[in-house]
Amino acid sequence: MDFTFTKIERLCSKKAIDDLFANGKSKTQFPFKLIYKVSEFESPFPARAMFVVPKKKHKRANKRNDIKRRMREVYRLNKHPLYESLKTQKIDLMFICLSNEELEYPVIEKSMLQLMETLTRINFSETKKE
RNA sequence: AAACAGGUUUGUUUCAUCGCUCUUUAUUUUAAGGGAGGAAAGUCCGGGCAACGCAGGGUAAUUUGCCACUUGAAAAAGUGGGUAUCCCAACAGGAAUGUUGAGAUAACAGAUAGUGUCACAGAAAACCAAGUAGCCUUCGCAGCAAUGUGAAGGUCAUAGUGAAAAUGUGAGGUAAGAGCUCACAUGUAUAGCUGGUAACAGUUAUAUAGGACAAACCUCUUAUGUUGUAAGGCCAUGUAAACCCUAAUUUUACUGCGACUCGUGGUAAUAACUUCGGUUAUAUUAGGGAGGGUAGGCUGCAUAGAUAAAUGAUGAAAGUUGUUUACCAAUUGGUAAACAAUACAGAACUCGGCUUAUAGAACCUGUUUUUAU
RNA sequence: GGUCCCGUAGCUCAGCUGGAUAGAGCAACAGCCUUCUAAGCUGUGGGCCAUUGGUUCGAAUCCAAUCGGGAUCA
């Protein structure tokens, strides 16, 4: 089992990001907000993800970097349940940090895992409808 | 010795697991190597580099600002000196103050080129000053007189101001006064001499007495072409050799028929066809107009290096500092354990300065307190 | 990565160029009016002029640095 997180798994296209902000659905689970959208792209992985820490919440660049790195680490280590649930469905993800305080690793891990669990349930229901 | 403040330098290490980015190698995931600072920050300055511009001169705009030397491509920095201001100490003096020494600070050219500003208060806030205060003279009137009052004139010594008052003190002089004259002192300008590389200092003569503000405009002096890597270069994408208008040209266009990569008839702004309702209307070149599309890759670009942006996460141990406890020692201290802290902060073309932020450690300087002599 | 602008009362803004009383509207509070409220009228309080230093007799204003907020570039 790989715990990699290379560039292919990240959401990098500006067009896709704009589309996500315009048409995506959202879930909040306090320190974080998740925006997701079903989409189509060519990749061996079923999801593309990105992580956002707004400049208005955290002024210093090094603190923003720290939080983003921890968020990325949580996603990297816990992405496999999500991938299994998705199967062939393709999806774009965006995690946004809403907190003003500097967050420790266990806090981030707990709330992000909750978000990803809810996401798996939602996607199953959608696939059944289609 | 302790505490505090300021300055300079430095600014943690190792292991395990799972990862990120770039380069090379391998070819589908294998190996090796590189991977954040003193400020990467602020963008306050100056270069490199790039595009455009460039006869010469001027104007505008911005900019430099005591002197010498050194470093530097330049901005700038360093060392030494000069001047001014502040503060401390010593000496002189009744005091004001002056001299000498140590230290700190200075955006430190020009206020005698010109314009402007100086509230309130005050007679007056600035070349040539100055009134219905005051002082003085003359004349008239009242009065025995002292004096009072009116007019004309002289004058700036005196004045409840103010941040700042027309150089200060003394003497002469005068009706009263006045640099009006003189002595001493202060300060400015010009010229000369002496010392010094110079800034400047000292001194002599002459002329004077001109308040502050240039971080108000300005003058002199120094320097600057403008814009910036989102510059610039190459490629792709795109309804696109597209649309509208004007002019010119043509085996060109439109159009009818046929045997349709061709032949032939008509037309050049009206023509051809027609089911009589209408339908179609061009190419090339030149000039102009209106609107749209793309916003992605490579390069620029680096012995760190991307383009939603890497340099990490978790766990363990050590180091440093502090607190508490226990033991040794008993002034400092040493050993062990537990707990806490371990900063400021994250490259985006690059280099050199400046500014700002910084736990702890080392060194230097200063202040205060305590102890000892 | 560059370039430029703005911070004044609880809110929206004047006053900065051209230096000497810190103001206006709304809001707040108190009173009048009204049976009561709203509206109206009268009054009151509220500001270290973003922060720090400098120039000046004197700084919201001039100068420098810092901290926030915003605009713009092809």
Image: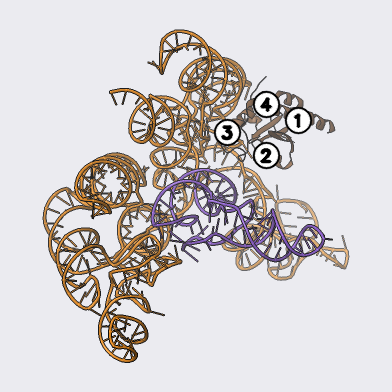
Chain colours: A brown, B orange, C purple
**Label 1: few (<14), some or many (≥20) within 10 Å?**
some
Q: Is residue B132 above or below residue B314?
A: below
- Mark 2 vs mark 4, foreground winner is 4
Q: Say what amino acid the circle numbered 1 marks.
A: Leu
| Residue A15 position in % (x across, y down) | 67, 41
Q: Are marks 2 and 4 in contact (CB under 8 Å)?
A: no
| Chain assignment, label 4 | A
Q: Is residue B168 left or right of residue C74?
A: left
What residue is drawn where x is 67% and y is 26%? A109
Mark 2 highlights which residue?
A17
Of callouts 1 and 4, the N-terminal one: 4
What residue is drawn where x is 79% and y is 31%? A122
Q: Could you confirm whether marks 3 and 4 are on the same chain?
A: yes
Mark 1 highlights which residue?
A119
Task: Give how far apart the Cα atoms at labels 1 and 3 are.
Answer: 28 Å
Q: Is residue B39 left or right of residue B276?
A: left
Task: Give how far apart the Cα atoms at labels 2 and 1 are.
Answer: 19 Å
Of callouts 2 and 4, the N-terminal one: 2
| Chain assignment, label 2 | A
Q: Say what amino acid the circle numbered 3 marks.
A: Lys
Mark 4 highlights which residue?
A109
Of callouts 2 and 3, the N-terminal one: 2
Q: Could you confirm whether marks 1 and 4 are on the same chain?
A: yes
| Residue B93 position in % (x across, y down) | 20, 50
**Label 4: few (<14), some or many (≥20) within 10 Å?**
some
Is residue A20 at all visible to an observer of this figure? Answer: yes
Q: Tag count in the figure?
A: 4
